[in-house]
């Protein structure tokens, strides 16, 4: 069925909102769980096929590319007056769901009590549905956006984009030619601070990086009955304990300062390094986000040593999951080295070696003009809304796209009730999204796209 172009008014927000809600339901109804197995191929393409059909109904055709069979990526371009494009993207996979624990079937997409229920409701078939509705809205209204818009639906985000964004960036960077800005998940869900009327809309202008540290201790092998010299197990234990018991200092990244400034303006509080964590307890759903974004962290997760109870091993290893703030890669490594030196003296490198994976933290200027343009749209649609830049203490597809020099932002506009913990519902049982929030988001997304 081909819907006729030019048959809809740009201001017909009701029809746009209704489509966004229906598409969100329909996308949830196509299960696309990702368990990290590269050969799960098929379910993501079923989602892509649905999107393709809905776009071709209104005469929009795009480009499909897949790293592996059944694990496709699809983009459609709407040319604007300014060729430096805005990429609006979402992932089509979701994390698995155990139906027995759910109040409503995880792939049912039912509407009940004002919510759309199901896996992907907030992560992120809601945005996938809004995007689809907005792309069709452009076609049906025959509207030319200010900036060229590229809508893209990608696979495998839940497995770090290995066969999705990461693969595209490394193997098909030309797919993103001409793109200057990117908008995706990682923010936009409103957070209300108790006893204050303002609704904060966090806008991710950066992400914390992941860096895995492998710590290897070397000692003298021997019989367990005759301990002599340096024991690798002992050295490793001391090193792990020293790292794990350290609280790294608060670091003022530009996104953090932008957030604290906004909170200060609304609450009138005097926020310092000494009181920020205590104060954050009063900031509702902001608390865990603030705590995770003020410092680097290092959590030991794996230990390996020895094969017999009576043999002292020559080597012992540990892995430490480090989460590193943007711009902190070098100084964080120095912090770790300094604390090992403090523990073992300057000869620590004789027993211990460190092997790091490169972190991929990034940040964009919180005063970027796109921030202002999002702020203008949101505050017009929600007079009690305050858009604030912040740092997402997690990772999205944007982590890979920023390597191409694209300025990346996380903002899925959702106007939410004060007691709705959206961030807490990511990957959780009973994932759901208010219908009204998706309706709100569809219009806000259309206006952001139109004024970027
Ligand atoms: Zn996601």
Image: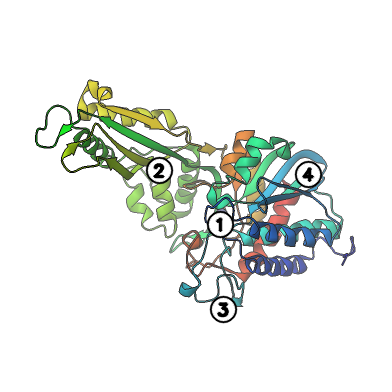
SS of the residue under disc 4: strand
Sequence-earlier tag: 1 or 4 = 1
SS of the residue under disc 1: loop
Q: Is the residue under label 2 in contact with that under label 4 (CB below 8 Å)?
A: no
Q: Could you tell whether 21 is left or right of 232 in the image?
A: right
SS of the residue under disc 2: loop
Sequence-earlier tag: 2 or 3 = 3
Q: Residue at x 51, y 72 (%)?
A: 99
Which residue carries the number 3 mark? 113
Q: Is the residue under label 1 in contact with that under label 2 (CB below 8 Å)?
A: no
Label 2, label 1: how far apart the Cα atoms are: 31 Å
For disc 1, the neighbor class at 10 Å (few under 14, some 14 to 19, many from 20) is: many
Sequence-earlier tag: 4 or 2 = 4
SS of the residue under disc 3: loop
Is residue 219 in view from this perspective? yes
For disc 3, the neighbor class at 10 Å (few under 14, some 14 to 19, many from 20) is: few
Q: Position of residue 126 (x, y in %)?
A: 63, 62
Label 1, label 3: how far apart the Cα atoms are: 28 Å
Which residue carries the number 2 mark? 294
Is the C-beta of the residue carrying label 1 under 8 Å from the nearest atom of ligand 1?
A: no
Sequence-earlier tag: 4 or 3 = 3
Q: Residue at x 55, y 70 (%)?
A: 106
Q: Position of residue 166 (x, y in %)?
A: 60, 41
Residue 34, numbered circle: 1
Residue 148, numbered circle: 4
Q: Could you tell whether 370 is left or right of 428 in the image?
A: right
State the colouring used for the structure image.
rainbow
Q: Position of residue 405 (x, y in %)?
A: 64, 33
């Amino acid at each position: 069925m081909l819907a006729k172009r030019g048959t809809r008014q740009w201001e017909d927000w009701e029809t746009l909102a209704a489509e966004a809600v229906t598409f969100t339901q329909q996308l949830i109804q196509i299960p696309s769980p990702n368990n990290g197995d590269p050969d799960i191929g098929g379910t993501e393409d079923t989602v892509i096929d649905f999107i393709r059909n809905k776009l071709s109904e209104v005469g929009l055709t795009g480009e499909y590319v897949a790293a592996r069979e059944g694990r496709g990526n699809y983009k459609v371009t709407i040319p604007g007056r300014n060729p430096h494009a805005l990429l609006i993207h979402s992932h089509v996979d979701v994390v698995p769901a155990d139906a027995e624990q759910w109040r409503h079937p995880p792939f049912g997409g039912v509407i009940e009590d004002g919510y759309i229920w199901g896996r992907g409701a907030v992560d992120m078939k809601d945005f996938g549905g809004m995007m689809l509705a907005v792309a069709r809205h452009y076609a049906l209204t025959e509207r030319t956006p200010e900036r060229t818009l590229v809508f893209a639906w990608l696979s495998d985000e839940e497995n770090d984009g290995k066969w999705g964004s990461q693969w595209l960036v490394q193997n098909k960077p030309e797919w993103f030619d001409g793109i200057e800005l990117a908008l995706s998940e990682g923010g936009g869900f409103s957070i209300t601070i108790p006893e204050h009327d303002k609704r904060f809309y966090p806008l991710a202008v950066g992400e914390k990086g992941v860096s895995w540290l492998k710590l290897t201790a070397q000692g003298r092998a021997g019989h367990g009955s005759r301990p002599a010299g340096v024991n690798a197990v002992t050295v490793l234990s001391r090193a792990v304990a020293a790292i794990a018991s350290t609280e790294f200092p608060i670091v003022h990244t530009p996104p953090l300062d932008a957030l604290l400034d906004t909170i200060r303006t609304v609450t009138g509080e005097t926020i310092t390094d000494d009181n920020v964590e205590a104060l954050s307890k009063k900031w509702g759903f902001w608390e865990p986000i603030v705590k995770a974004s003020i410092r680097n962290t290092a959590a030991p997760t794996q230990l390996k040593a020895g094969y017999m109870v009576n043999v002292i091993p020559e080597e012992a290893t540990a892995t430490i999951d480090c989460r590193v703030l943007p711009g902190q890669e070098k100084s964080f490594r120095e912090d770790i080295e300094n604390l090992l030196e403090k523990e073992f003296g300057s000869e620590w490198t004789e027993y211990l070696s460190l092997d790091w994976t490169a972190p991929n933290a990034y940040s964009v200027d919180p005063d970027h003009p796109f921030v202002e343009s999002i702020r203008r749209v949101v505050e017009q649609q929600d007079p009690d809304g305050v858009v604030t830049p912040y740092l997402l203490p997690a990772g999205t597809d944007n982590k890979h796209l920023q390597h191409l020099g694209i300025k990346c932002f996380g903002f899925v506009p959702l106007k939410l009730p004060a007691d709705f913990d959206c961030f807490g519902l990511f990957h959780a049982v009973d994932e759901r999204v208010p219908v009204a929030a998706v309706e709100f988001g569809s219009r806000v997304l259309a206006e952001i796209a139109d004024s970027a």
